[in-house]
Image (cartoon, helix red, strand yellow):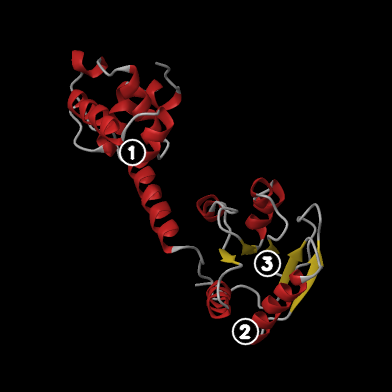
Amino acid sequence: MVKVNCKATIVTRTLQGTQEQSLECIQSLLKLLQMPCNIVRCEKSFVALPDEQLVFVDLTGFTCDEVFSFDMAVLAKRKSLVLFNATEGQVDERRALLSGVKGVIYAKDEPDIKLKGIKAIKDGELWFRRSIISSTFSELLVDHAIFNTPAPTIKQDDSSFNLTKREKTIVKLIAEGAQNKEIANKLHISDHTVKTHLYSAFRKTKSRNRIELLNWARQFFPDALTRSYSE
């Protein structure tokens, strides 16, 4: 496991009021870990930053749409980027994780939790909610299985092309990583109806699970993975 540089930079948009106290708290925690740091006020671009490898971006004052700007995405590829002082619903943790961010620290977290998170990141670990890491890892494993396992040889018959438009739409959404509840919400149907269409697709394609269904679609009906279908 590779440890990051022990120097850190804190990037913030404001240095007013209670924000100063919050920054002082992070500085104190870094000091406990013997990590000297400097504070940089940056209103626009995050690209031109000091050479420190570990960068904490203070999310105070950011809207949800601004949290993961292009600059932050670029920065995450070059440095160990940590988002802190986050509020509930402000950060898409899955997107941050897949983009290379090392962790998200919430403003409501107790100091000991923040310290534990910073130490973990310093030691080269990730700091996200366990459910986010688990679900993202599971999705990546499914993607790997779908695109790296040779599609099974399936005898083509008339039933191969009997999927309804709704079933094709559901196959496409599954290929995009959507779960049954998400599909139901998107299509304005019940979870039970999603399962009914899914089981029908399994039966028609002689698939035993989602991976075999997507392998079938990739081999015999690639349009189901690349194009939306209207009712």
* Vertical side of 143 occupied by 91: above or below: below
* Vertical side of 224 occupied by 120: above or below: below
Q: CA distance from mark 3 to mark 2?
A: 15 Å
On screen, residue 201 versus residue 121, left or right, reads: left
> Residue at 24% of width from left, 15% of height from top?
162
On screen, residue 223 versus residue 197, left or right, reads: right
| SS for callout 1 | helix
Residue under label 3:
56
Type of amino acid at the residue the image marks with label 2: Leu
On screen, residue 14 versus residue 121, left or right, reads: right
Residue under label 1:
180
User: Closer to the camera: disc 3 or disc 1?
Assistant: 1
> Which sits in the foreground, 104 or 35?
104
Type of amino acid at the residue the image marks with label 1: Asn
Type of amino acid at the residue the image marks with label 3: Phe
Q: CA distance from mark 1 to mark 2?
A: 44 Å
Can residue 148 be seen from the camera position used here? yes
> Which comes before the other along the chain, label 3 or label 1?
3
> Residue at 27% of width from left, 32% of height from top?
213
- Neighbour class for label 3 at 10 Å: few (<14), some, many (≥20)? many
| SS for callout 2 | loop
* Vertical side of 173 occupied by 69: above or below: below
- Neighbour class for label 2 at 10 Å: few (<14), some, many (≥20)? some
Counting from the top left corner in percent of width and height, residue 27 is at 71, 79
Say if mark 3 contacts mark 2, CB within 8 Å.
no
Counting from the top left corner in percent of width and height, residue 29 is at 64, 81
Q: CA distance from mark 3 to mark 1?
A: 36 Å
> Which sits in the foreground, 98 or 57?
57
Residue 33, label in figure: 2
> Which sits in the foreground, 66 or 8?
66
